[in-house]
Image (spheres, rainbow, N blue to C red):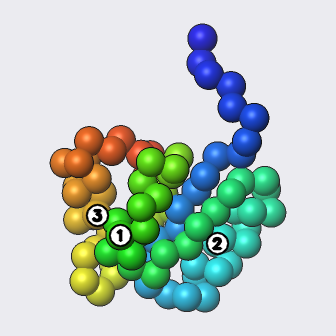
Amino acid sequence: MGSHRSEPARIAVVDDDAAVCQSISSLVRSVGYRCRAYQSAEAFLESGGLDETDCILLDIRMPGMDGLTLHLALIRMNYRIPVIY
């Protein structure tokens, strides 16, 4: 049996393009999920929100740490958060 939570899933949007972050975040919220946007992989890692994230919508190409490197870092840190590129 799976656990049933009463609050919506928490989605993180990680993309260096502010307009893309805002658009995707608005879309995610419009279908009932909670959402936080981050304009870099580093900002996401520093946010302290890893334990509160249920899924990541992740840009692959970003300055600094790219999406693939972030995903690998999360795996090394034992975070198995589902990622959608």
Mark 1 = which residue?
46
Between the C-alphas of marks 1 and 2, the distance is 21 Å
For the point 56% across and 73% down, the residue is: 37
23 with respect to 39 (left or right): right
Q: Secondary structure at mark 1?
A: helix
Residue nearest the viewer, comparing 49 with 55:
49
Query: Residue at 73% of width from left, 42% of height from top?
Result: 7
Say what secondary structure mark 2 lies in. Answer: helix
Q: Residue at 33% across / 44% down in the picture?
A: 79
* Horizontal and vertical percent position of residue 34: 68, 57
User: Percent position (x, y) of residue 61?
Assistant: 33, 78
Q: Which residue is mark 3?
A: 70
How far apart are the two marked residues, 3 and 2, measured between alpha carbons?
19 Å
N-terminal of the pair, mark 3 or mark 2, is 2
Query: How far separated are the C-alphas under marks 1 and 3?
Result: 12 Å
| Mark 1 or mark 2: whose residue is earlier in sequence | 2
Q: Earlier in the sequence, mark 1 or mark 3?
A: 1
